[in-house]
Image: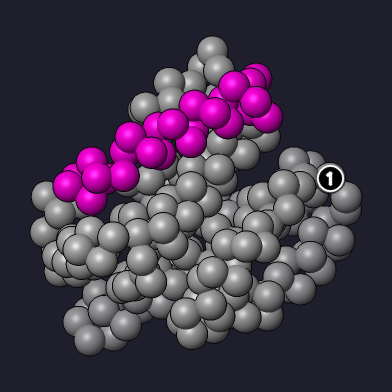
Amino acid sequence: MGENHGETVELLQRWHGGEREALHTLLKRFLPRLHQFASSKLHSEFSQLQREQDSLDLVQTSAAKALEYVPPFVPRDDEQFFGLLCTFVLNHLRNRLRSPGSQDGERKAEFGDSVLDLRPCERSSEYPPQAAQDAEERAWARFALEFLPQSERRLVLLRVVEQSSWEEIASELGGTPDSARMRFNRLIPELANLIRRLREGQVDELLSSPAPKT
């Protein structure tokens, strides 16, 4: 396990250093277990998705997409890293179940500069040091979103990424525009707290208390 963990850390570091081949190697190492995990979910609580989802394709797509935005992060061991990958896959399944035929905003989800603005900031590209800092903050914010309940995660994506109006959000998620706005405002400190906990290494605690499915 220790040797395998060292390989995982090295691959993650190479991936964060810009070596795309390291991402493919990393996924290949965990793909069989993730495939088994996704298949079991598609035959149980997500059986409605069986016909439209190929589990192998789902694993590759959701895990690769998630690792695109994971910040520079060293897992405690391979099991913790596998737990994170399972969380990414589960969230992808929940998105598909809630919004069949859509990608839950993922096609255009370029997540931005802070907890309050997850969209890309074009101005920061003029200042490379600031751009690097902004990119890392975006990564932590997007990482933290994985630990929000599905409906709350969708609320953030609708407002910040898709820039939907409060009326449009209320139409999709239910409630009134005012209640959607208040829910969003309450989420900001919660998301900031999740980012803090992830930065402090409280990953196991978050994995052992999965976000509600609502």
Percent position (x, y) of residue 2? Answer: 25, 66
Element carrying mark 1: loop
Q: Which residue occupies the foreground of this view, 151 or 147?
A: 147
Residue 181 at x, y percent in the picture: 78, 65
* Residues rendered magenta in the picture: 24-49
**From the viewer's perspective, is residue 110 above or below residue 194?**
above
Q: Is residue 44 in view?
A: yes
**Can residue 100 be seen here?**
no
**Does residue 103 sit above or below 100 in this rendering?**
below
In the rendered image, which quarter contains the N terminus? bottom left
Queried whether the magenta region covers residue 196, the answer comes back as: no
Residue 146 x %, y %: 55, 58
Above or below residue 95? Residue 175 is below
Q: Name the residue under label 1.
A: 174
Q: In which quarter of the image is residue 126?
A: bottom left
At x 79%, y 65%, the residue is: 183
Residue 77 relative to residue 52: left or right: left
Majority secondary structure of the magenta segment? helix
Residue at position x 11%, y 50% from top? 21
The quadrant in which residue 157 appears is: bottom right
Is 209 in front, or is 67? Answer: 209
In this picture, residue 150 sits left or right of residue 176:
left
Q: Which amino acid does label 1 sit on?
A: Gly
